[in-house]
Amino acid sequence: HSAPASVPPSGPPTAAFAAMGVSAATREGAQVTAFANTPVPSLLQSGSAATGVTVNLAIQCSDLMDKDRGRSKSDPCVRVLMKASVSDGWHLVGETETLRDNLNPEFLTRVPVQFHFEQPQLLLFEVVDVDPKGAPGTSGDCLGRLHSTMGDLMGSPGNKVESKLEDAKKGRITVFAEPSEKDGDSMVELCWGATKLKSMDGPFGKSDGYLKIYALDPSARFVAETNVVNDTSSPTWRPLLVSMNRLCGGNENKPILVKCFDHDTSGNDDLIGSFECSLAQLMRPTGFETELIPPKKSHKSVGSVRVVRTPRIRRKPSFSQLLYEGLEISLMVAIDWTASNGAPSDSKSLHYFSPDARQQNAYETALTAVGSILLPYDRDHMIPAFGFGGRPPGASDVSHCFPLSGVPQQESVYGVQGLLAVYKAALGAVALSGPTMFSSVVQKAMDLERHSAKGPNKKYTVLLILTDGEIHDMTATQRLLARASESSPLSVIIVGVGSANFTSMEVLDGDGARKSMHTARDVVQFVPFSKFSGPEAGPRLAAATLAEVPTQVSDYFFMTSK
């Protein structure tokens, strides 16, 4: 069987990467409407000159309630809602990552919002205990709320609001407003090492150390953290890239706080010690090394931290600048062919092809939406298209990376319409099987990227994986993603289709997993398709999945530049 591999494109619409979307949901006492992460509708008449300023919200909580009742600890996430006036409805503008087993979370993910000085802009922060086994889109237990306004936040000393959580027996929340990172921001590269770190697991163990860096405003605001280096008292951590704006507002003499922790897989990380310094001190030609100050007064040393290499300040290339320089972005697609999707002839199947051409299944919607955004940035419009977890025509064994065309020498198709055509043809030819494995398609993307890297222009690949369930080769996939984060111009977007438990996908998502996966940069974005519904599901899905790509692209070319 050979599926059609070339169908003239209908001309993909252009769209902005920066758009970002969320699904409709209902909260206690508030209707949350599907809304793009663009400014909340202005109270001013159209034509107003007011444009607003992008502000990043940094959030941390302490002493949260534990609703898991001893089985484990709460898995908190904070959702940020906004409305422009009292009479408007609440709109979800963003959320933090979920931190497992943590009652004192310091969230790394920032929530960008548009600040309009001339508007009230009411804010609602909901702290939620996410149930990893719950159905996609479910809210989880509420751990408390905070009502505030952008005026309260921006007008307070240090641009900070701190309060006891409402509707909760205990718990506090602190919200900081940070200036957003602008195109071409200066970045500082921090290279740390440590000596004779104390093990918090007893005299016979060695520490699993990592550092957390805070800006002092004067309150401590969490900014970044290193990777974990396991089982050693003298670790050297990967270089850490931090925005100068976020770290010290561009002031090299502003104090910063560094804390050293011993990582514990249970989530109970132990503080080994801390110290304060400034970027100017770290950049001294004579070097920098200091003793850690233990949390409890002690005359015994708990270890020292040093600068391995003098910090370098460099300007990060903006995404738009890279496009001006001729950057090409290619799309590669991998589709789940495991039996859990259901037979394509069954109307309940995730692969069901409706006789009504206007009705697309979730796979078609994702292929169309993401492909239409990325295709204008690809010069030849050729899309490598693969399946995994199925048995191709003529094969006796399951393959975890096979060309949808059925022809090994013909891995690519032309345009979005060609992609949809080859997918439809494969539905009648490929036998569903299993299990779900990602490592082969990730390796294939890395191989194709190396082959296409030849030439004068910069090139970057986005691998779109569409899947309906948990993966069975987590360790191998994590190892490949860690390699890709260091040396491959690659981003991996995973769209979860159906109602399966996608806990493992959350583990892969770089927003909350970089520390455990040892990745040098964020390369993974996971989005459950169930968050999007209605006629605008496709565009909102594309916006949410692609929102982090510009930053990931800039990070890669900055990290690999000399």
Image (tube, rainbow, N blue to C red):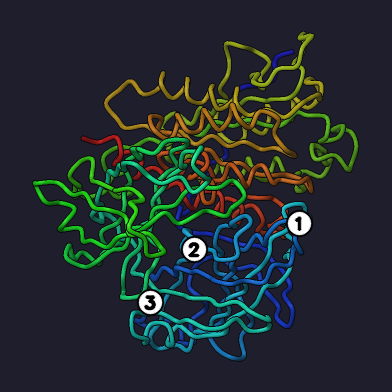
Measured as percent of width and height from the top left, residue 260 is found at 39, 53
From the viewer's perspective, is residue 487 above or below residue 497?
above
Amino acid type of disc 3?
Gly
| Residue positioned most to the front | 299
Residue under circle 3?
52
Residue under circle 1?
71
Horizontal arrangement in the rendering, residue 188 relative to residue 462 (left or right)? left
Give the class, few, some or many, for how many residues have Cα within 10 Å of label 1's Cα (few <14, many ≥20): few
**Residue sitting at 85 percent across and 39 percent down?**
349
Measured as percent of width and height from the top left, residue 228 is found at 45, 42
From the viewer's perspective, is residue 531 above or below residue 85?
above
Measured as percent of width and height from the top left, residue 482 is found at 47, 33
Quadrant where the N terminus lies? top right
As helix, strand or loop, the secondary structure at mark 2 comes to loop
Amino acid type of disc 1?
Arg
Between 15 and 473, which is closer to the camera in this rendering? 473
Residue 139, image quadrant: bottom right
Contact, mark 1 vs mark 2 (Cβ under 8 Å):
no
Residue under circle 2?
106
From the viewer's perspective, is residue 144 above or below residue 85?
above
Residue 449, image quadrant: top left
